[in-house]
Image (cartoon, rainbow, N blue to C red):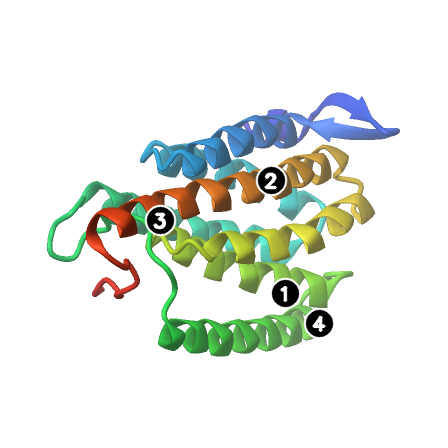
């Protein structure tokens, strides 16, 4: 199976594109479209997507991104669980804004993750792009956490990560994946608008929606 996934499916911009990358493109687009619509099916589709991308990233030496996919599987399960709990005491029933305390926590975690991953990749792996690999890994983890808790600003984190991912994947010759992330960038704008509209609609009906949901 791994040999087939790593085998060329098509050639784009003079570089071979594997079946794993091609299927990752399809499942990735479907996943983000489902997130925009707040459909719970985004989580199982997303888990399939990250397993495919794990194969792609490892094959080109993006070790942090490959390892990140393992964490994504766990976060995908967490998000799936939270979204399906609905409006229960600890569940996620709708979109909300990020609190000041959460922003501080996200910022501290983001800087710490980036520095630690950068040092690890630079000293202990053969990564040729340790800093952008570490930065995108940290941003993606924070964005996935925010998505699981339906924080509307998680789309900002995804967009920031995408702006780094696009040239990074082009540099690695993963042109289809780079194109996928251009599409993701556009979907970030659509997702932010859709989640903001939902947030404003709920605020108009029941007052401001910005209180944190307990873990």
Residue drawn at (78%, 50%) of the image = 167
User: Compared to 182, does 148 lie above or below?
Assistant: below
Q: Which one is in front in this view, the residue at disc 1 or the one at disc 4?
A: 1
User: Compared to 118, does 77 lie above or below?
Assistant: above
Image coordinates of residue 7 in percent, x first then y, are 69, 26
Image coordinates of residue 136 in percent, x first then y, are 62, 59
Residue identifier under label 3 = 200
User: Dot 1 lies on which element?
Assistant: helix
Separation of marks 3 and 1 at Cα, in angstroms: 32 Å
Q: Which one is in front in this view, the residue at disc 3 or the one at disc 1?
A: 3
Residue identifier under label 1 = 135
Q: Find residue 122 and name its label.
A: 4
Query: Of callouts 2 and 4, which one flags the residue occurring earlier in the amino acid sequence?
Result: 4
User: Dot 3 lies on which element?
Assistant: helix
Q: Nearer the viewer, residue 135 or 200?
A: 200
User: Dot 2 lies on which element?
Assistant: helix
Separation of marks 2 and 1 at Cα, in angstroms: 18 Å
Image coordinates of residue 182 in percent, x first then y, are 69, 39
Q: Which one is in front in this view, the residue at disc 2 or the one at disc 1?
A: 2
Residue identifier under label 2 = 184
State the count of labels. 4
Query: Of callouts 3 and 1, which one flags the residue occurring earlier in the amino acid sequence?
Result: 1
Q: Which one is in front in this view, the residue at disc 3 or the one at disc 4?
A: 3
User: Around disc 1, counting alpha carbons within 10 Å, would you say few (fewer than 14), some (14 to 19), or many (20 or more)?
Assistant: many
């Amino acid at each position: 199976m791994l040999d087939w996934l790593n085998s060329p499916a098509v050639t784009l911009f003079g570089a071979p594109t594997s079946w794993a990358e091609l299927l990752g493109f399809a499942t990735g687009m479907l996943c983000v479209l489902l997130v925009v619509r707040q459909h719970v099916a985004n989580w199982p589709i997303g888990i399939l997507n990250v397993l495919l991308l794990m194969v792609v990233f490892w094959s080109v030496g993006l070790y942090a991104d490959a390892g990140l996919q393992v964490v994504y599987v766990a976060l995908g399960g967490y998000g799936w669980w939270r979204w399906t709990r609905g409006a229960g005491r600890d569940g996620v029933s709708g979109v909300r804004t990020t609190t000041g305390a959460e922003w501080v926590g996200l910022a501290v975690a983001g800087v710490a993750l980036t520095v630690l991953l950068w040092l690890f990749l630079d000293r202990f792996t053969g990564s040729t792009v340790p800093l952008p690999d570490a930065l995108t890994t940290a941003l993606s983890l924070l964005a996935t956490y925010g998505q699981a808790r339906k924080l509307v600003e998680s789309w900002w984190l995804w967009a920031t990560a995408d702006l780094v991912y696009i040239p990074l994947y082009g540099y690695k010759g993963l042109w289809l994946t780079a194109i996928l992330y251009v599409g993701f960038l556009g979907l970030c704008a659509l997702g932010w608008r859709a989640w903001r509209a939902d947030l404003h609609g709920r605020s108009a009906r029941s007052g401001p929606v910005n209180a944190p949901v307990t873990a």
